[in-house]
Image (spheres, rainbow, N blue to C red):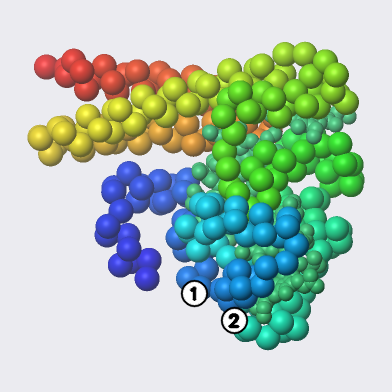
Amino acid sequence: MISTTVKHLPPIVIALAILGLLESPVALAQLDRSRCADCHFANPYTEPAQQHLHRWSLSPHQRADVGCDSCHGGNPDTFESLQAHRGVLSSFNPSSPVHRTQLPATCGSCHVGPYVNFQASRHHELLGQGDRRVPTCSTCHGSVDGRLLSPQGLERQCAECHGPDGIEPRPGRAADARLLLEGIANVRESLEAARRLIERVRDAGRRRTLEAAYLQAEIPVIEARRAGHRFVFDQLEERLETAQERTAALLSELVNPAP
Ligand code: HEC
Ligand code: HEC
Ligand code: HEC
Ligand code: HEC
Ligand code: HEC
């Protein structure tokens, strides 16, 4: 399965996968359609559950075939309700994989990079002690949505707790988070522009060299996004600076090729 799909991936993706920087979502996602969603869509019940289904159907999880059982457990191969729900626990139950204290491990089983970094944070330490004041994965990404916050959205999120009226006021922290996320977004935009320019390079040898330089610039961006989950930003800043320097060098090489 993997060997037949790998051929169609761009070399950059293959190289990232070899370096372990991509989490091979295709391989992780379940390959067969699960019956959970089929039955749930056919059974309209409570309003919040309907909204949850709707969000799932619009999410990157649905697109990548990450079904209900990936987060909730249960048996996705049957239409028999009792069997299907064996092991499925309400999110209010502390042993449920979707209880807020369990989410880092549940989401982290697929999103290893963010999880490893999150584990190094004070938020994670307190969450493990059952502290309800700290954020968990769904605070920023939604329960099922897999949404990404804009820089302003992130600032607002941090400020809910660290703003002047928050439970843990730390002026400046929310604004720092916004600035850094803007930095990441800018570098990603520049890299996207570089990628399009590289595609148009005719000389195969030069294109390979540029693709290698692209990869060298992209790796620290991926690492920076993950390092953000420590919420102490020294590592993120260092990775972002490296990415900015390499991206600038790549763009200048594309625009003014060395003779
Ligand atoms: C045969 C239809 C059917 C199948 C198959 C099914 N469900 Fe359900 N599920 C329901 C219905 C109906 C309810 C609402 C029951 C209630 O509210 O008492 C429910 C409730 C739930 C709940 C809420 C439980 C709670 O304690 O609040 C979750 C979570 C859930 N299902 C997940 C799943 C998952 C995951 C699967 C697949 C592994 C699945 N369901 C398969 C029909 C189904
Ligand atoms: C990416 C993880 C994820 C996926 C995929 C997912 N859910 Fe959930 N679901 C959650 C989380 C987290 C909650 C906890 C409530 C919240 O935070 O909104 C939840 C809550 C629920 C609830 C409310 C009952 C409760 O235990 O709180 C139902 C019902 C439910 N999910 C059904 C489904 C069904 C059906 C699917 C598939 C169509 C699905 N979920 C897919 C993460 C997920
Ligand atoms: C079974 C594996 C699996 C689980 C469990 C899972 N995800 Fe995902 N997630 C994926 C895949 C696959 C994608 C789509 C490919 C991608 O963007 O990485 C995705 C996409 C995302 C994205 C968008 C990433 C991007 O770059 O656009 C976010 C954010 C996300 N998931 C957060 C979560 C959160 C939070 C949870 C737990 C509530 C969770 N995921 C649970 C596999 C999973
Ligand atoms: C306080 C907010 C916050 C919390 C809590 C949080 N994240 Fe994130 N997450 C972000 C931000 C900000 C980004 C970067 C978004 C961007 O680049 O646009 C991100 C990016 C991601 C991505 C996409 C990038 C990547 O490396 O794949 C995934 C997946 C992800 N987070 C998963 C998780 C998981 C799993 C948890 C829980 C262990 C979690 N996040 C907790 C804010 C948060
Ligand atoms: C849901 C509330 C909540 C959100 C959202 C939140 N935090 Fe926190 N944060 C806390 C709490 C509570 C503590 C614990 C303070 C203590 O007792 O040590 C904490 C601790 C921290 C710490 C470690 C303590 C310190 O002063 O060094 C950092 C750093 C931090 N948060 C940064 C952030 C950043 C950056 C964001 C946004 C990306 C954020 N937090 C979002 C509640 C939150």
Residue 83 left/right relative to 148: right
Q: Which residue is at a point 29% across and 23% down the rendered structure image? A: 250
Q: Which residue is at a point 29% across and 49% down the rendered structure image? A: 10
Element type at marker 2? loop
Residue 231 falls in image quadrant: top right
| Image quarter (top left, top right, bottom left or bottom right) of the C terminus | top left
Between residue 148 and residue 136, name the one nearer to us: 148
- Mark 1 or 2, nearer chain start: 1
Disc 2: which residue: 77
Q: Which residue is at a point 18% across and 15% down the rendered structure image? A: 256
Between residue 215 and residue 231, name the one nearer to us: 231
Gap between marks 1 and 2, in whole Å?
9 Å
Between residue 47 and residue 171, name the one nearer to us: 47
Is 46 above or below relative to 231? below
Residue 118 shows up from this direction: no
Residue 232 falls in image quadrant: top right
Residue 209 falls in image quadrant: top left
Q: Position of residue 174 (x, y in %)?
A: 70, 20
Between residue 227 and residue 94, name the one nearer to us: 94
Residue 199 left/right relative to 248: left
- Assess whether mark 2 and mark 1 are in contact (beta carbons under 8 angstroms): yes
Q: Position of residue 136 (x, y in %)?
A: 75, 43
Q: Position of residue 228 (x, y in %)?
A: 62, 31
Residue 51's label in the rendered image is: none
Residue 151 shows up from this direction: yes
Element type at marker 1? loop
Q: Which residue is at a point 83% across and 43% down the rendered structure image? A: 127
The crowding category of the residue bearing disc 1, from other C-alpha atoms within 10 Å (few below 14, some 14 to 19, many at least 20), is: few
Disc 1: which residue: 32
